[in-house]
Image (cartoon, rainbow, N blue to C red):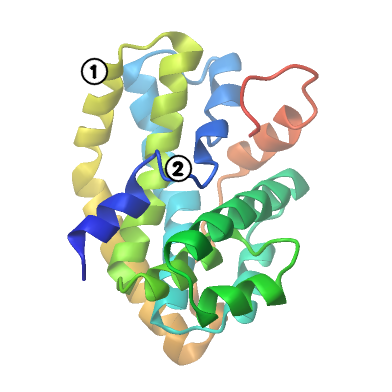
Amino acid sequence: MSRATLLLLADGRFPAGGHAHSGGAEAAVKAGRIRDAATLEEFCRGRLHTAGLVSAALAAAVALGLDPAEADAAAEARTPVPALRATSRRLGRQFLRAARTVWPGPGLDALAAAFPRGAHQPVVLGVTARAAGLGPEDAAYIALYESVSGPATATVRLLGLDPFDATAVLARLAPALDETAGHATAAGHRARREGAGALPAASAPLLDIAAHQHAHWPVRLFAS
C-alpha cells in the first residue's frame, strides 16, 4: 500500500468533481439545520454513519473483487432519490476520467466500457483503488473522508464559517471515522463472500428529501 497514493485520492484537489457538491450541506444550511460548527459536526456525524458507511462498504467490496456490475446495482438500490442517483453517476464519470489518466489499465477501461453513462461513484472508487494498488480499508477511508470533508468545506463558503473551526470538526470526527472504516471494510469482506445483499443499507431520509428539493431550486451554489 502506498500512503502517497492514498493521500492523492483523498485530497480534495484530485480532479474528481467533488468540489462542486456540498453533500447535502447547502440544503441543510438553508433549512437552519447547519448554523455553526456544532451543528456542522452533528450533520457530518449523521452522514458518516449513513451515506458514508454505505459508500465505504461498496468501495471496499469492489476493491476486494466484488463484481462492479453487482455492486452498481446494489448502489442503485440504496440510492432512492433520482437526483442523488444522477449525482453519484456524474461524480463516477468524472472520477473515472481522472483515474484512467493517472492509473491507466484494463480494469478501469472495462468499467468505462460497461457503464458509458457512468457507474456509481463508490464503484469507481473501488476499481480505482485496485488499479492504484490500494486495499479495501484504504477505499473505505477515502469514501468516508469525502462524505464529511465535502460538507465541511462547503459550509465554509455557505456560512462564512471559520475554516479553522471546520477543520476542527473533521479532527473531532476522526475516531468515529476510524471505527466506521472498520465496519465498512468488514461489510466489504462479507459482501465479497456472500454477495452484494450483505452490504449495509443505512438510510438518512432527511438527506434524501432535502436532495430532492435542492435539485429543483432555481438558484444554488452547489450541484448537490
49 over 172 or under it: above or below: below
Categorize mark 2 by other alpha carbons within 10 Å: few (<14), some (14-19), many (20+): many
Q: Is residue 99 left or right of residue 222?
A: left
Q: Position of residue 124 (x, y in %)?
A: 53, 65
Q: Is residue 183 left or right of residue 66?
A: left
Q: Is residue 73 above or below residue 216?
A: below
Spatial CA distance of label 2 from label 1 is: 21 Å
Locate residue 125 relative to residue 164 in the image: left or right. right
Compared with residue 86, is residue 200 higher up or lower down, i.e. above or below?
below
Q: Which residue is labeled 2 in the image?
A: 47
**Nearer the observer, 18 or 136:** 18
- State the quadrant of the N terminus: bottom left
Residue 138 image position (x, y, % from top left): 29, 64
Residue shown at 55%/79% (left/top)?
Answer: 196
Q: Earlier in the sequence, mark 2 or mark 1?
A: 2
Relative to residue 141, is residue 224 drawn left or right? right
Q: Which residue is mark 1?
A: 164
Instruction: Kindly identify the residue that appears in the image at 65 percent across and 42 percent down.
Output: 208
Query: Is any atom of residue 179 visible in this view?
Result: no
Image spot of residue 197 (x, y percent): 56, 79
Q: Secondary structure at mark 1?
A: helix
